[in-house]
Image (cartoon, grey):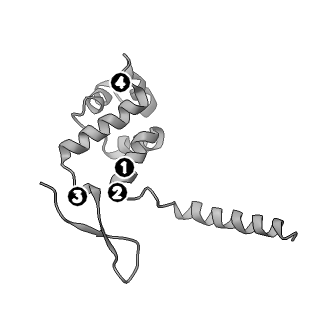
Amino acid sequence: MAHNREIVSGNSRAKVARKSPAFEMTHGDYLKRVSRAFREHTGNRPGAAQELAGEIECSDKTTKSWLDGKTAPSGILDLRAMNRIPAYAALKREIAQLESDLDPRLQAKLQELHQLTQQLADGR
């Protein structure tokens, strides 16, 4: 059964709320989506678990469990998977409703780049 919890978006005093997909799915649904994300990366070819284990630096027994939809990464392996597997990182950002959020450091650099571009265009 899906829960109807809401999370607060941003740090606005208005407390604009939005539903989070994390509260709208079951654990089983989550495991299936994790498995699909890893399969998107590795395909269904033989040796997929070993390939994934090499990329994330863990055992192939662990990654086989992820590919089979029995478990999902946690702790440091979760962070490694997010860093190395784009489809998994995208899934986590989607579920947490962060797909449109940028790292504040990147946002600042983009703003700086935009300002420099404007200055060059203005001939300064």
Q: Is residue 92 visible?
A: yes
Residue topped by disc 2:
96
In percent of the image, x 37 and y 70: which residue is there? 9
Q: Amino acid at mark 2?
A: Ala
* SS at circle 3: helix
Residue topped by disc 4:
49
Q: First in sequence, mark 3 or 2: give its number.
A: 3
Q: Amino acid at mark 3?
A: Phe
| Disc 3 packing (10 Å; few <14; some 14–19; many ≥20) | some
In percent of the image, x 32 and y 35: which residue is there? 36
Is the Cβ of the residue at disc 3 closer than 8 Å to that at disc 2? no
Is the Cβ of the residue at disc 3 closer than 8 Å to that at disc 1? no
Q: Quick one: which residue is furthest to the left in this view?
A: 1
Residue topped by disc 1:
92
Q: Amino acid at mark 1?
A: Lys
| Disc 1 packing (10 Å; few <14; some 14–19; many ≥20) | many
Q: First in sequence, mark 4 or 2: give its number.
A: 4
Residue topped by disc 3:
23
Is the Cβ of the residue at disc 1 closer than 8 Å to that at disc 2? yes
- CA separation in Å, label 3 and label 4: 29 Å
Q: Position of residue 10 (x, y in %)?
A: 40, 72
Residue 19: quadrant of the picture: bottom left
Which numbered disc, 3 or 4, marks the residue closer to the eye? Answer: 3
